[in-house]
Amino acid sequence: MPNSKLSKPTMQALRFYEHGEPLEVLKLETVEVPAPGVGRIRIAVHACGLTPADSALCRGLFSSGLPRGIGLEVSGRVDAVGEGVDDVRVGDLVLGTPDWIDCPTAGMAGFAIMDRWTPVPAGLDLTDAATLPMAAETAFRSIDLLGVEEGQTVLVHGAGSTVGVAAVQIALMRRAQVVATAGDTYADKLRDLGATVTSYGEGMVERVRQLAGGSIDLVLDTAPVTGALPDLIEIAGGNPQHVLTISDFEGSEKLGTRNTGRDGTTLRYDVLPEFARLAADGRFTVPIGGTYPLEKWRDALQLSLSGKAKGKLVLMPANA
């Protein structure tokens, strides 16, 4: 970690100095290792999940002071503890979210300042641990916002995404009947979990209705923006309030569906301990599409932006 030619310890970090397309504005550079403030801890990052939110930050989402780091979900070993923190010690393994607002670096770095964390349970691999925060939080918040209950029939559209796979599992935990739309990559996995699966495209409305054996009570859209909301509203019996999207906010405003950008803004990271335990027990999983050393960030980001990642992409700093 330390560079003997500099007065303070340094690390590699991925940051941007202006807003724009991620591949154009991001730079991997050497920066000082940040110190944890009050109520914060610092970890040596083992793994960091790459999410669509990282690209959105580069493009100006939640614009704030620059430079800014990316990487919103991490796992690693506690390296330093700030004032007022008494639930972890140096050396503990944790997963959670970095403080990307008040710190000029985030999780795509050798070290990260954490604002939310939970212990990594025995039996949970550190790389798998890094995939949990965003997918579990978004899926749980969405399923909760929809009000999914036992006995209901739920469609998860785009169930091959990381949030989609998580949402299917959570809906099934609530003893709902789940129909999922997905491509070939995760269709069999989704069936193994207990969902009934069909493909996208022409005839989707009729296929979903047939598989559901009647009406669909609620619809969760976890797919990229493809203009599918009119079909999803039709599947929901014509009631746009029975449809929630995590991605097509513009279409949602036009068509009157619910969306997580407006209706579900209170984040639910309080559920992370539960999902970490479930993952450790093999009862919850987020698929990994590939792991990359931090210096190969451009390859990982290109794959992510292509929409062909087939699972969570994970960056591994040198600490791993």
Image (cartoon, rainbow, N blue to C red):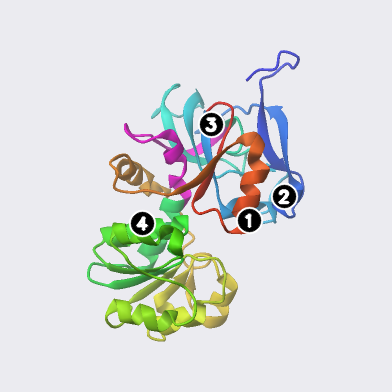
Give residue 45's mark. Answer: 3
Give residue 106's mark. Answer: none
Classed neighbour count for the residue bearing mark 4: other residues with Cα under 10 Å, few (<14), some (14–19), many (≥20): some
Q: SS class of the residue under badge 3?
A: strand
- What amino acid type should be assigned to the residue bearing mark 4? Lys
Q: Are marks 1 and 2 in contact (CB under 8 Å)?
A: yes
Q: Earlier in the sequence, mark 4 or mark 3?
A: 3
Give residue 189's mark. Answer: 4
Locate residue 196, reporting x and y percent: 31, 68
- The residue range painted magenta reads 112-134
Q: SS class of the residue under badge 4?
A: helix
Q: Which residue is mark 2?
A: 23
- Between 15 and 271, the one lying in front of the other is 15
Mark 4 or 3: in front is 4
Q: Which residue is mark 1?
A: 305
- What amino acid type should be assigned to the residue bearing mark 1? Leu
